[in-house]
């Protein structure tokens, strides 16, 4: 963010807590990103390019990569960079790509973009600027599965997003932080959670031999997983380039068969909820198979 006639906010921040946005403007200290986060951002950029390559292999024309877009309101200006415009015979779409770990990806499968209000706000701003339907391409970083969703309307109200940003901006002009409450999950992810008082108690550190070995295996496995996905992706691209000309062949004991371009049909949940009463949707919902929800991540360095 920077000062001017209208203060500039990034569209990627449009769904952030107004208290945090105001604190940044007022010069409050924000902890630096950990090396884990920096590595994750690099990985996401790599995965984003793989998604673009996959879409192109399926017949999509991808243009306007990282094109800058902007919107103006009486108090502020919103600026962002879109992932691209995806085109094919049935139209043009605003392309939005996300690369998520498998647990976060499962949350997306169950709740859609509205399970991540910061993403939803970002996409809403892009759509307001571009005025095209949205193609969401969300990749599971752990399995390489890509879920595609087409949304004919933005997931959130742009006016409500602006109202939230105005709260931050008006507080800054008054030299204070706005009152704002967020849920516990958002607070856990917040880089400036210290603004809202003491958090949870310190988590107990265990030094049991079997868990120390498990931690070593987990880090080693994650590294091998990234290396394996990169190698498999390169191999698939080489096989696909040949298979388009020669649909069936063998090489080094592998059988390669090309079945042509396929397309799955899916339900646009946002559009469905705008057409069908919520009570009807609840009646059609069925519980999935339960699983143990275990999450492992590198801790932030103090």
Image (cartoon, rainbow, N blue to C red):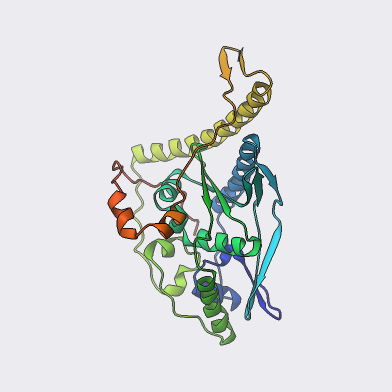
91 sits to left or right of 290: right
Along the viewing direction, whichever of 223 and 267 lies nearer the viewer: 267
259 sits to left or right of 77: left
Quarter placement of the N terminus: bottom right
Where does the image place residue 64, in percent across and percent down from the top left? 71, 52
Along the viewing direction, whichever of 234 and 71 lies nearer the viewer: 71
Classify 280 as above or below 75: above
Along the viewing direction, whichever of 166 and 44 lies nearer the viewer: 166
Where does the image place residue 205, in percent across and percent down from the top left? 36, 52
Kindly indicate the quadrant of the structure image that contains residue 23.
bottom right
| Residue in the image at 64% along x and 22% along y | 243
Where does the image place residue 207, in percent across and percent down from the top left? 36, 45
| Residue in the image at 44% along x and 50% along y | 108
Q: How many marks?
A: 0
Classify 21 as above or below 218: below
Along the viewing direction, whichever of 276 and 285 lies nearer the viewer: 276
Kindly indicate the quadrant of the structure image that contains residue 252.
top right
Kindly indicate the quadrant of the structure image that contains residue 259.
top right
Where does the image place residue 185, in percent across and percent down from the top left? 40, 61
Classify 265 as above or below 195: above
């Amino acid at each position: 963010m920077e000062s001017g006639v209208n203060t500039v906010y990034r569209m990627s921040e449009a769904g952030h807590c107004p208290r945090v946005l105001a604190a940044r403007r007022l010069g409050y200290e924000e902890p630096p990103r950990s090396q884990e986060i920096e590595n994750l951002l690099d990985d996401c950029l790599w995965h984003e390019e793989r998604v673009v390559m996959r879409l192109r292999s399926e017949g999509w024309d991808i243009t306007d990569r990282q094109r800058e877009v902007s919107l103006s309101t009486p108090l502020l200006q919103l600026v962002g960079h879109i992932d691209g415009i995806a085109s094919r015979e049935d139209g043009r779409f605003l392309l939005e790509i996300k690369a998520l770990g498998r647990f976060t990806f499962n949350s997306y499968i169950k709740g859609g973009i509205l399970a991540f209000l910061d993403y939803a706000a970002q996409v809403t701003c892009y759509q307001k600027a571009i005025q095209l339907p949205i193609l969401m391409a969300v990749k599971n970083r752990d399995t390489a599965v890509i879920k595609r969703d087409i949304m004919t309307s933005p997931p959130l109200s742009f006016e409500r997003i602006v109202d939230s940003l105005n709260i931050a901006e008006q507080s800054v002009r008054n030299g204070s932080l706005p009152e704002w409450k967020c849920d516990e999950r958002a607070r856990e992810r917040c880089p400036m959670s210290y603004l809202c008082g003491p958090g949870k108690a310190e988590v107990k550190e265990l030094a049991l031999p079997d868990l120390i070995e498990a931690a070593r295996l987990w880090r080693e496995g994650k590294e091998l997983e990234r290396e394996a996905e990169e190698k498999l992706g390169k191999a698939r691209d080489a096989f696909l380039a040949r298979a388009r000309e020669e649909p069936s062949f063998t090489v080094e004991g592998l059988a390669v068969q090309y079945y042509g371009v396929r397309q799955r049909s899916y339900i646009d949940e946002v559009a469905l909820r705008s057409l069908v009463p919520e009570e009807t949707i609840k009646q059609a919902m069925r519980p999935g198979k339960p699983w143990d929800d275990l999450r492992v991540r590198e801790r932030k360095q103090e």
